Amino acid sequence: MTAITLLSTEILWRSALYGSIAFAIIGFARLMYLLFIYYDYVSPLRDLPGPKDHHIFLGQLLNQFRAGDPEQPYTDWMQKWPDAPLIRYRETGFAAEGLLINNAAAYRDVMQSQSCYAYERSAPFRRLIGDIIGVGLVFAEGTEHRAQRKALGGLFTVSNIKAYLPILQDKADRLVAEWDRAVTDEKDDGNVEIKQLYAKITLNVISIFALGIDFGNLDSRTAFQSCYEAMFDLSTSGMLLAAINLVVPIRWLPVQANRVFMDASTELRGILTGVTEARILSVASDNEKPILPPTASPTKDLLTYMVETKYRATNPADRWSKEELIEQLLNFMATGHETTAGALTFATHELGLHPEVVAKMRKEALTLPESPSFSDIDRLPYLDAVIRECLRYQTPVAGIPRVAQHDVFVAGRRVPKGTTLMPVPAVLHRNKTLWGDDATTFNPDRWLKDPLIGGATDGDSCAWVAFGHGPRACIGRALASLNVKVVLLSLVKQFEWESVHKGKLPVVNPSGQLRPSGEVWLKVKRVGEETK
Ligand code: HEM
Ligand SMILES: *[C@@H]1O[C@H](CO)[C@@H](O)[C@H](O)[C@H]1NC(C)=O
């Protein structure tokens, strides 16, 4: 080797070394800047009010972890800074800023069609629930999201959902039979645990809707149910992992709580893969007259519909792969059952604390014909009021954070790219300016005065946002509403019940959803009978 090449190798090595040192120094300086300087001294939002009790690294995460429920820090701030449209807090990670949406107009600014695509789901949120609910519609963004909503929207319209009434009624009848059994059975003595029952019913319903398969009875546990329980009902170490996973991805760590979680997630995907592959074959096997598997859906189920219109789309640009179908199914299986089960659990529990409301519901229910039609059920004002009030009082979806993809305007304020906007329905639902002094009281009657906004004074459609608002609002609202209505109607007609736990149910925290922790028990009797 000549001296010249030796020298040039030497120079190369040296410059690489100095380069990386410089790079490390700049990186470190930037980190220090983000951690210690940007948030307090540079951010254009630093004049906004907000809590200062954050951890430099973990932001508000520790406080969230210590809080009683997923909404609590936010509702505390709302009370502390009632007049601020936006409340600034420190997110987890490097100097990330979060803004709590604290009034109805600001909520609309973020959610409405003109602006909703300026935001995307945040990475921590994706990590918190992406493994559980798949990366279908809930995580699609921009034009992709618009295309998916357009492709699937038809299945979710009220006119399509109406056809599910007999199925929902059948499930409700099975629930009634289950309660009946508990009332008659010496051993049960009228004690009923509702969380399990509702998880089963809503999983049954969503399986029929999404897969065209009825997994059957309330007395059998399905693999689906065990998987979701493993992922939602976390052990303490499981919670800790979920929390850390918000800051740094650690689902790969080989520890027990991770294994339980990942096994369940793998099993779920496995089941859905099997169902999807079989359906692809059965749809393809006879092009002229497709022989569908025995389907319980009154209309075309989501999977068959997706195979026909998307998997086998004539235009390649419209096609979805098998994997994409599976992610969509995961998405709908999770979003479709967990929220509705939560809504039913909270509602039934709350009604067990308010026998006078149940009596009023029963009176209204008894005005219905023997087998009521969809419109009979849909136009019952008090039933509607009770359900809206239940969803206001305890809102199953606690809040899905959005991250601004470019500078945006919210409540007249310029908000820089990268800021997290946090919509927490409870913050609007407990706002006394909107709902009056009894905002934190359960009072279905408020909706009778004004069925659309529950007496919220400024006539603002974003006062009640249990199903969100704008192009990303809940696609499953019609199905969920009908499901909840049919179940509650059947129950109030035949039973009276008392909640064992007095007051609001304790919930899982941290969590993207309001999910009751542990079992939820009622003491049940038939209408007019004495409690045993
Ligand atoms: C009482 C029950 C339910 C409640 C309270 C509820 C609530 C919500 C809320 C608040 C959102 C908007 C999230 C956001 O701000 O981005 C949402 C979105 C969604 N919901 Fe529901 N939901 C319920 C039932 C259902 C059902 C039964 C299904 C499926 C059949 C479903 C499927 C979805 C999907 C796929 C999205 C994402 C929509 C999108 O990003 O375009 N939900 N839900
Ligand atoms: C409640 O909402 C109103 C109207 O959106 C807003 O002006 C007010 O600041 C909010 N907060 C409280 C605590 O009233």
Image (cartoon, rainbow, N blue to C red):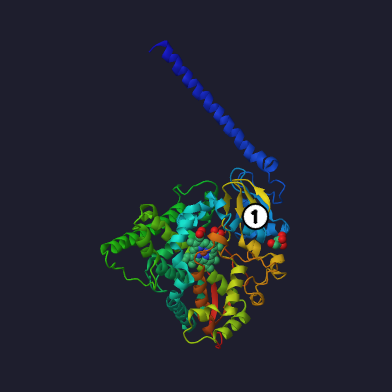
| Residue 525 position (above or below residue 291) | below
| Residue under the image location 52 percent in, 63 percent down | 474
Residue 530's spot in the image, x, y percent? 56, 87
Quick one: SS at disc 1? Answer: strand
| Residue 228 can be seen, yes or no | no
Image coordinates of residue 419 in percent, x first then y, are: 61, 48
Choose top left, top right, bottom left or bottom right for residue 160: bottom left
Q: Quadrant of residue 41?
A: top right
Q: Residues within 10 Å of mark 1 (few under 14, many from 20)?
A: many
Is residue 406 placed above or below 226 in the rendered structure? above
Q: Position of residue 167 (x, y in %)?
A: 42, 76
Q: CB of residue at label 1: within 8 Å of ligand 2? A: no
The residue sitting at 50% across, 70% down in the picture is: 478
The reply, left or right, for residue 47 in relation to residue 248 is right
Residue that lies at the very extreme toward the top in this rendered image: 3
Point out residue 221 in the picture as x, y percentages from the top left corner: 40, 69
Q: Quadrant of ligand 2?
A: bottom right
Q: Of all residues shown, which one is farthest toward the front? A: 315
Residue positioned 45% across, 66% down in the render: 154
Q: Residue at x 44, y 62 (%)?
A: 152
Residue 80 visible, this angle: yes
Q: Quadrant of the C terminus?
A: bottom right
What is the quadrant of residue 364 in the picture? bottom right
For the N terminus, the image quarter is top left
Q: How many marks?
A: 1
Give the amino acid type for the residue marked by disc 1 in the picture. Answer: Leu
Q: Nearer the viewer, residue 285 or 510?
A: 285
Mark 1 sits on what residue? 100
- 385 relative to 328, above or below: below
Q: Nearer the viewer, residue 255 or 111?
A: 111
